[in-house]
Amino acid sequence: MKKCITRIQSRRLLPLLLATALIACVFDTTPLYAQSDFHWDADGATTAATGGTGTWNSPTVSPDLWRSGSATGTLGQWANGNNAFLGGTAGIVTLGDGNLTVANLTISTSGYVIPGISSGSAKLTLIGATPTISVTTGSSTIGSFIGAGNGFRSLAGTTGLTLNGGGELILAAGLEGVSGGVRVTGNSILTAGDRNSEHLGRC
């Protein structure tokens, strides 16, 4: 009799167990991995200074211009899908190709420029649920105008853009490459087009 009851109970529990497993699968929003922090160091190990002018290459492309974990971390190559920090000495950071992805970008020195590219497919693609650009001081530019006001975008993404940090971000080529909405927080300023364009938001 005990064996019979056990079998009946097992049969009744099986659909419930399957449903519970399905719910856990559907609603588990834990990230597959945690992003790492990479700090820009254009001159590599040449000096102790960080930041500067150089080319942001895709993973596996030398030289090693990124410090892992902190501004004094180990030098290495960029790894897609992580957090990028532009600090130290401001400079012009040219995108090497179209395969660059970033979860969050923090610019902590005023005057950085990520130029627009007049040819090729070089761009920086925002990924993740809430990709954020933080400009913590002054003003920096992504997608500069080239020549007589012809802009070429260098920023793309389909999950929107959040701007915070209190500084100003100029998207000189506009927002054509970014979809999914724009959210401006933390007393930040977002200008699309150029400094003569209307500010999109300040909170």
Image (cartoon, rainbow, N blue to C red):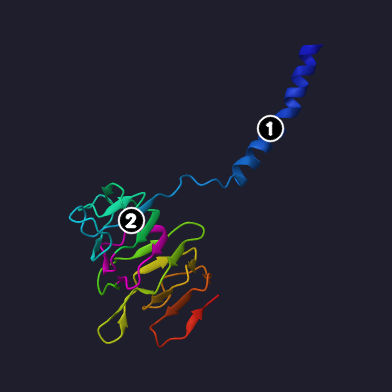
**Other-residue count near label 2 (Cα within 10 Å), few / some / many at <14 / 14–19 / ≥20:** many
Give the image location of residue 48, x and y in percent.
Answer: 23, 55
Measure how far apart labels 2 and 1 are at the Cα level. Answer: 46 Å
User: Circle 1 — which element?
Assistant: helix
Which amino acid, by three-letter code, is at mark 2? His
Q: Quadrant of the C terminus?
A: bottom right
Give the image location of residue 160, x and y in percent.
Answer: 49, 66
User: Circle 2 — which element?
Assistant: strand
Q: Is residue 6 left or right of residue 135?
A: right
Q: Nearer the viewer, residue 90 or 179?
A: 90
Q: Nearer the viewer, residue 133 or 48?
A: 48
Q: Is residue 101 magenta?
A: yes
Residue 71 image-quadrant placement: bottom left
| Residue at 76% in and 28% down | 12
Q: What mark, if any, has residue 17 been given in the picture?
A: 1
| Residue at 39% in and 82% down | 193
Q: Which residue is mark 2?
A: 39
**Other-residue count near label 1 (Cα within 10 Å), few / some / many at <14 / 14–19 / ≥20:** few
Q: Residue furthest left?
A: 46
Give the image location of residue 151, x and y in percent.
Answer: 32, 79
Residue 125 image-quadrant placement: bottom left
Where does the magenta region start and end? 89-114
Give the image location of residue 106, x and y in percent.
Answer: 40, 62
| Residue at 35% in and 68% down | 109
Q: Residue furthest front?
A: 48
Q: Nearer the viewer, residue 197 or 181?
A: 197
Q: Is residue 191 left or right of residue 24?
A: left
Q: Quadrant of the N terminus?
A: top right
Viewer-nearest of discs 2 and 1: 2
Which amino acid, by three-letter code, is at mark 1? Leu
N-term mark: 2 or 1: 1
| Residue at 59% in and 44% down | 28
